Image (cartoon, rainbow, N blue to C red):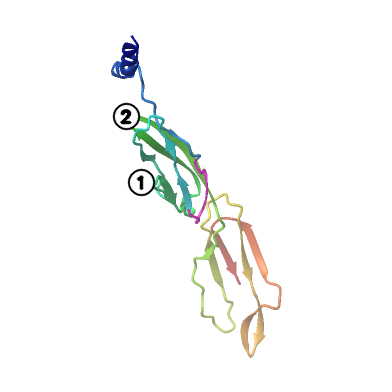
Amino acid sequence: MVKMKKLILGILPLILISFGVYAQTAPYFTSTAVTEATEDSPYTYTAAAIDDDGDLMTFSAEVLPSWLLFDDGTQELYGTPTNDHVGDHNVTLRVAAGTDFEEQIFTISVSNTNDPPSITSTAVTTATQDAAYSYDADASDPDPVGSPDLQCFCKPRLAVHRSKLWPSHRHTNKCRCGAKQRHHQSFR
């Protein structure tokens, strides 16, 4: 009787598995995704998961923005967002064990860093004696519209030095400022 009981208890799990009573469980993520990134700074997140059944797990990236890469061997998500990537980006990672899987779905918010504006026009470098000099300056700011930047154009005062006009840094400059946009400023 004791031998029969041991035999039944020994083969019961096999019977349950063969009839589908014993179900495999899906692996699950144990790591919390990094959801904040900064423009021009490296972003990394290493995914971690557990499979309670001890099955071999595979990792994959189902949805990634263009600036991110995923190494399925190390489970590392990495990349460096640029000014073009400021905003929200959807990501979906998957861990699978056989046909069972779980997905980790999250959004990475890339924050802006202030990039310097640049002068996009070419200065007029010649002048005619006794005639007004004019130069229309254009500038561009690479930061996304809506950034709290303010662009200013400053007109240096000119001082006479050895019969030539030179910019003087000893005097207060006249500046014109405006809300961020493509600026066109004329100096006379």
Secondary element type, mark 1: loop
> Dot 2 corresponds to which residue?
99
At label 1, counting other C-alpha atoms closer than 10 Å, the crowd grade (few under 14, some 14-19, many 20 or more) is few
In percent of the image, x 38 and y 36: which residue is there?
A: 95
Most extreme residue toward the right is 171
Which residue type does callout 1 highlight?
Gly
Q: Which residue is mark 1?
A: 73
Question: 31 or 87: nearer the eye?
Answer: 31
Q: Nearer the viewer, residue 35 or 181?
A: 35
- Give, as a three-letter code, the residue at label 2: Thr
Q: Start and end of the magenta stretch?
A: 33-42
Asked if residue 40 lies in the magenta stretch, the reply is: yes
Q: Identify the residue at the far top of this view.
A: 1
Q: Position of residue 57 (x, y in %)?
A: 35, 37
Instruction: Tell me the number on the disc at residue 112.
Output: none
Residue 134 falls left or right of residue 172: left
